[in-house]
Amino acid sequence: MTKDEALLAYTLRLGDNALILGQRLIELVAAGPELEEELANANFALDFIGQARMFYSYAGEIEGKGRCEDDFAFLRDDREFANFLLVEQPNGHFGDVIVRQVLFDSFYGLQLEALTKCKDKRLAEIAVRAGKEICYHLRHTSQWLVRLGDGTAESHARATEALGRLWRYAGEMFAGDEVDIILQSAFDGPDLETIEAQWSLKVAAILDDATLAIPDEKWIIGGGRQGHHSESMGFLVAEMQFLQRAYAGATW
Amino acid sequence: MQNKEWALYEVFIRTRAGLSHRHAGSLHAADDQMALDYARDTYTRRSEGVSLWVVRSDQIVASDPAESAAFFEPAEDKIYRHPTFYEIPDGVENL
């Protein structure tokens, strides 16, 4: 794998995580528990979509075959998406959403922070912009996790159950492959071992505030990176791509 | 399941450095931090501000509309309180 191939794959992965998680949050639009949370969620969803657009546009330039952001988002099959399994997990209840967001945002924020120092200028620029958004998302979602965990007996039980179910998907974020290795060696990209250590401390602190125990789960499920997605991913992609598949080339 | 009504908060935004905070609207939140977050997401999405204040509405002491005659009308005929009787010397643009 060449440097450019690794950079392209890495940029697409960043775009895929952002797009798929953005799509999951969009599913919640008009279903917020309170008007104010509804607005916050829609803002977050659009932040992710905006980040996906930046990553995909740049990926198109790296690839140099004339593909644009829409081609990556709407004309690839689910097996071609390389997002983490964590971000494609169905919304479930509000506690499930918050746990998923906290686990991912706390990784993604660290990843972006490391990318601001990488040698690829464009990626570093996007990371600066996206990093500020994710820093705020994590502030919001981690406060919610503390409210739920340290709230009523029912909210505590539901948050515990959500954490237990989603924890097994967190490990994939730190399981680097050739793409991560090349990005680190050739572009001064993120060091996943460092990030995992920082993530563990950060998440442990949030869970401590939330009076939630770190799950004793050693089983890690991966495969998203290779396009092996969970069952729900196909439904998400089908809904997301419906318009472009049914009416190819449709524009506003 | 507990179903307590969230508290009402008033939101104040400083639009630029040097200007004062102005009332922008209100929102519901369960605690102060949540109120600040929601104020950010509800009222500053289009770069409306550089600083936010939120305060619980029940903490604001307001004048009583029923007393507005006694409160505000006596000021209406005191035109001498407006600085409009000074003659501005020639050549002075601002006083």
Image (cartoon, coloured by chain):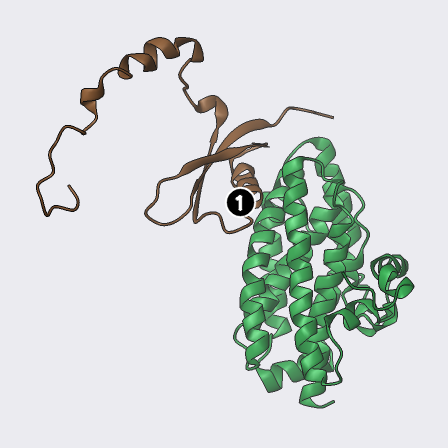
- Picture quarter with the C terminus of chain B: top left
Q: Nearer the viewer, residue A158 or A232?
A: A232
The answer to whether A129 is drawn above or below residue B33 in the figure is below
| Residue count near mark 1 (Cα–Cα under 10 Å), binned few <14, some 14–19, many ≥20 | many
Q: In the drawing, does residue B55 fall left or right of residue A12?
A: left
The answer to whether B4 is drawn above or below residue A119 in the figure is above
Residue at the spot 63% in from the left edge and 48% down from the top edge: A141
Is residue A70 visible from the viewing direction of this image?
yes
The answer to whether A250 is drawn above or below residue A180 in the figure is above
Q: Nearer the viewer, residue B7 or A67?
A: A67
Colour seen for chain B? brown
Q: Which residue is mark 1?
A: B40
Q: In the drawing, does residue A83 fall left or right of residue A139?
A: right
Residue at the front extreme? Answer: B90
User: Which secondary structure, mark 1?
Assistant: helix
Residue A98 in picture, x, y percent from top left? 69, 47
Residue at the spot 60% in from the left edge and 49% down from the top edge: A206
The kind of residue tagged 1 is Arg
Residue A166 in picture, x, y percent from top left? 77, 53
- Picture quarter with the N terminus of chain B: top right
Q: In the drawing, does residue B61 fall left or right of residue A92?
A: left
Is residue A218 visible from the viewing direction of this image?
no
Q: Nearer the viewer, residue B2 or A124?
A: A124
Residue A238 in picture, x, y percent from top left? 88, 60
Circle 1 chain:
B
Colour seen for chain A? green
Residue at the spot 54% in from the left edge and 37% down from the top edge: B35
Residue at the bottom extreme? Answer: A2
Q: In the drawing, does residue A145 fall left or right of residue A158?
A: left
Q: How many marks?
A: 1
Residue A129 in picture, x, y percent from top left? 55, 65
